[in-house]
Amino acid sequence: MNTVRGIYILIIKIDKTLRLKIGALDTITFSAGMYAYVGSAQNSIESRIKRHLRKEKHLFWHIDYLLANASVEIIQVYYLTGDKTRECHTAQIITKHNKPIPNFGCSDCNCNSHLFHLDDFTFLNNQQLLTLPTM
Ligand SMILES: [Zn+2]
C-alpha cells in the first residue's frame, strides 16, 4: 500500500456555508453540501490521504485550506492507479456532471478546477474506483 501511486478522489462534506480565503485565490463561498476533489500522489497515496485527514498541518495546497476547517470532513476516498494525466482526465469527467469551483487545485495544469460541488455522485460507481478506509 505504501508504494501505491495514482490518483484519488476525496468526497468531502461541508456542514455549513463557509467563506474561506484559499491560498493565493480570492475568498471563495462554499455552500453546504458534498464536494469531490481530484488529486494525484506519485509517491504514496496512503501517506497523502493520511495528510489530508489530519487537521493540523502546514497549509500548502488549496485543498489544505478547505480541509483545515472544523466544518469540513472527508467522508469517502476513492483511488485508482495512474499518472497525472489521468488525474486531469478524471477531473474532466466529474466536471461534466457537477459544478466546478473555478481555479481550485489546478495551479499546475490546464483544467478549470479539481474541486466540484456534487449534485449527484452515482456516476462514480461506473468509474471502477477502489476505496480506502478514512480511519
Ligand atoms: Zn488538471
Image (cartoon, helix red, strand yellow):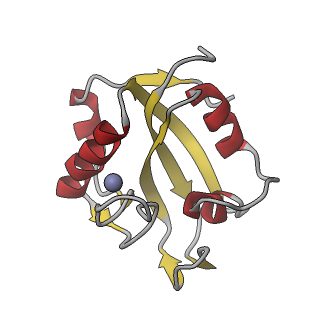
Please tell me whether residue 73 is drawn above or below residue 69 in the rendered image.
above
**Residue 34 at what x, y percent from top left?**
44, 55
Q: How many marks?
A: 0
Point out the quarter of the image occupied by ligand 1. bottom left
Specify whether 5 is left or right of 60.
left
Say which residue appears at 21% left-offset and 47% top-offset.
93
Please tell me whether residue 6 is drawn above or below residue 64 in the rendered image.
above
Q: Residue furthest right?
A: 56
State the quadrant of the N terminus: top right
Closer to us: 123 or 16: 123
Q: Residue furthest top?
A: 1
**Residue 63 at what x, y percent from top left?**
57, 58
**Residue 66 at what x, y percent from top left?**
61, 63
Say which residue appears at 47% left-offset and 73% top-offset.
31
Specify whether 16 is left or right of 11.
right
Say which residue appears at 26% left-offset and 50% top-offset.
94
**Residue 116 at what x, y percent from top left?**
36, 59
